[in-house]
Amino acid sequence: MPGSKVTRPRLDQPFVTGSIDTLTGTVPVVPVELTWRDRRGGYKVRWGIGRYTYTVDPGLYAVGSPTDLSPVLVTANYKLTFDALRRTLTGRDAWILVLDTRGINVWCAAGKGTFGTAELVSRVKSSGLAQVVSHGVLVLPQLGATGVAAHEVRRGTGFRVLWGPVRAADLPAFLDAGSRATAEMRTVTFPLRDRLVLIPVEAANVVALALAVAAGAVVTGGIGPGWYSVARALERAPIGIAAAFAAIIAGTVVAPALLPWLPCRMFAVKGAIVGLAAALLIDLVFWSAGAPFSLAAAGVVAVAGASFAAMNFTGTSTFTSLHGVEKEMRLVMPWQALGAVLAVGLWIAGGWL
Amino acid sequence: MSDLRYLEDVITLRFDVDKCTGCGQCALVCPHGVFVMDGNRAKVVDRGACMECGACALNCAFGAIDVKSGVGCAAAIIASYFRRGDVSCGPDDTGGSTGVCC
């Protein structure tokens, strides 16, 4: 494109295995097989480690030996997303156009607008794409539609947007069918496998909160007759720690796994139900301690904490709406707050009783 | 239809069939099958499945769809209590992280 500067991703990124020359410069080639280093990186970010810096350079990449007739697949610059895309392209020649989403996946970035019309239009221009392909078509992941207006991309670049499937795994079938998606490819689901893979990062997000609650319980556990006793704090510590961890396991592991089978549509209620089961389990384990108020406090922490943690899974899920979650929060947060106050009162009283 | 459904009575989706030209974009982009094509017009067949993502409204070149869109995420809503701006995911415009999820 005359007058506009073409920029390319760096060739020295560790996953780049070669390069091909185009009319507008050298394009890095990436393989379709993931290396152990790619897999290790993906495993780490699933636990929330280095998630916000797990990126690839934005711009144009090549898979196989693409020509001016090969499809252009648009994606985000979160490396987990980029890897999920390229690994589906075995035996294919394609261009991958990576948008700068600041290391965020397609759906979240589209909601934010960084996987958006403006970024796509400017990236098409800065990659010199009009000189690289002759078909004038971009294939976008369907979930990018929250940020990209197809008709405005056409007006801004001349390129036509084709909405690809929701899941990258369906791309081969989509391309083989002449860029046609079935109803299943267009629909977001949330099967057990997808829920389970999200549990580590969900738990990592709230583990600090659970540790703070556990530490608070241990420290305040010493309050009682004679004002403070370290021995009493240590004696009650297991109950406090068990309550905090029962809450996060119930709310971030069990409730998400059992999501479709728990009654009520509100996530906070689903979490509270699992939390109640956890509370009964704590009672059973610590019954011989003969500390009814401490056990009651632990039970309330398990129920309210699991309810809060499960409520936060709304953002991880694929089917909740803004106004639905606002309604849920209005209904349940006063009860969660009441639970927090009640738990503190019961726990302090437990120092005496 | 998925067995996972959420609160349905507060959905803000509105569709003006008189402005619809039948281009079919809404039915293509909706990930929950809220729209289907009925002859040469779109039709809302499962309003309760709407998650207010806004993809349909953004891709309707004719202004036939209106939805107060945002993310159905408690963590993002809580974060929005503490900072100005919309309820949304990801790093804020200053490049910093909101500290919540994605």
Image (spheres, grey):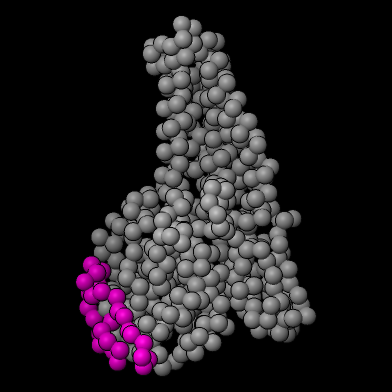
- Name the residue: 70% across, 83% down: B22
Above or below for A313 versus A175? above
Q: Could you say where residue A139 lies in the image, as x and y percent from the top left?
A: 47, 80
Number of dots carrying numbers: 0
Does residue A81 show up?
no
Q: Quadrant of the C terminus of chain A?
A: top right
- Name the residue: 55% across, 24% down: A344
A25 in the magenta segment: yes
Does residue A209 show up?
yes
Name, please, the residue furthest toward the right: B18
Above or below for A277 versus A88? above
Where, by quadrant of the figure, is residue A187 drawn?
bottom right
Left or right, B36 with respect to A258, comes to right
Left or right, A146 with respect to A95, comes to right
- Name the residue: 30% across, 79% down: A8
User: Which span is picked out in magenta?
Assistant: A1-27
Q: Could you say where residue A48 lies in the image, as x and y percent from the top left?
A: 38, 50
Is most of the magenta stretch helix, strand or loop?
A: loop
Where, by quadrant of the figure, is residue A168 drawn?
bottom left
Q: Could you say where residue A91 lies in the image, as x and y percent from the top left?
A: 33, 79
Q: Quadrant of the N terminus of chain A?
A: bottom left
